[in-house]
Image (cartoon, rainbow, N blue to C red):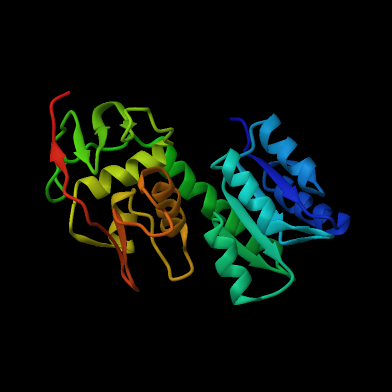
Amino acid sequence: MTSNTILIVDDEPKVRLLLRRCLESDGFTVVEAEDEPGTLAAVSGRPVQLVTLDVNLGGENGLEIAKRIRQRSDVPIIMVSGRDDVIDRVVGLEVGADDYITKPFHVREVLARVRSVLRRTDQMENAQPSAPRVSGEQTTSVEAVTFDGMIAYLDRFELLDRDGAQVEMTSGDFRLLAIFLGSPKRMLSRDRIMDLLHGTEWTPFDRTIDNQVARLRKKIERDPTSPSLIKTVRGIGYMFAMDVKQTED
């Protein structure tokens, strides 16, 4: 079985060496980069299953690099920082990072975080998304549903925007959308969403669902900065606030 490839992005050779030894000893393939050009080239030029990205890369901002990675790829990102700063954590998660580790770190923590993020990603990407009905949380298949001028063909994982153009969606994006379309105008807790996405256990520090919702909003909301479709229920979860109707294919 081919091992997962991890991209280590850090401008400190000693840190890269420590992470390389840690990950390779656990069977991962490791590539390295020390700046933005090397990072984007690595992400674009070869299959990479996860990136560990230092927040401070000399004169470069790791958060900005994370944004550019996210524009090109849905590859999971674990931010690494020398500061245990809440603002850095929040901003890192908001730009699309999947987890956050502070220095100094223990190699066992790194391995645990990498395995956890990869496990969640595999669960979301490899399983076939269900096609729930347009009411409740039923699993009876329907051909298509409409919402806010968009059409989702649930049986073939296709989404058309308000102009009829196909929206680029990962299986994780579509699976999350299908869950919301199956429970319109109902509050869904993060725990419930995680259960529907294969029963992954959620913890208060697990922002995977929040990151996925943010990415989905960019693809379906008229204004992602002021979402009208997927509403946040503060401290609990989310609600799909728009009517959903079955339509003819």
Task: Compare residues 158 and 11 and report the one nearer the observer.
Answer: 158
Left or right for 80, reference 191: right
Residue at 57% x, 39% y is 73
- Considering every residue shown, the one lying at the far top of the view is 249
Q: Residue furthest right?
A: 13
Q: Is residue 48 left or right of residue 121?
A: right
Against 219, is 214 above or below? below
Residue at (27% x, 42% y) in the render: 178
- For the point 43% across and 51% down, which residue is it? 212
Residue 248 in the image: x percent, y percent?
13, 26
- Name the residue: 59% across, 76% down: 86
Q: Quadrant of the N terminus?
A: top right
Q: Position of residue 133 (x, y in %)?
A: 14, 41
Image quadrant in which the C terminus is located? top left
Report x, y in % for residue 95.
56, 57
Query: In the figure, 202 relative to 34: above or below?
Result: below
**Tag count:** 0
Q: Is residue 23 left or right of residue 224?
A: right
Where does the image place residue 43, in percent across and percent down from the top left?
67, 38
Task: From the viewer's side, name the closer residue of 181 and 209.
Answer: 181
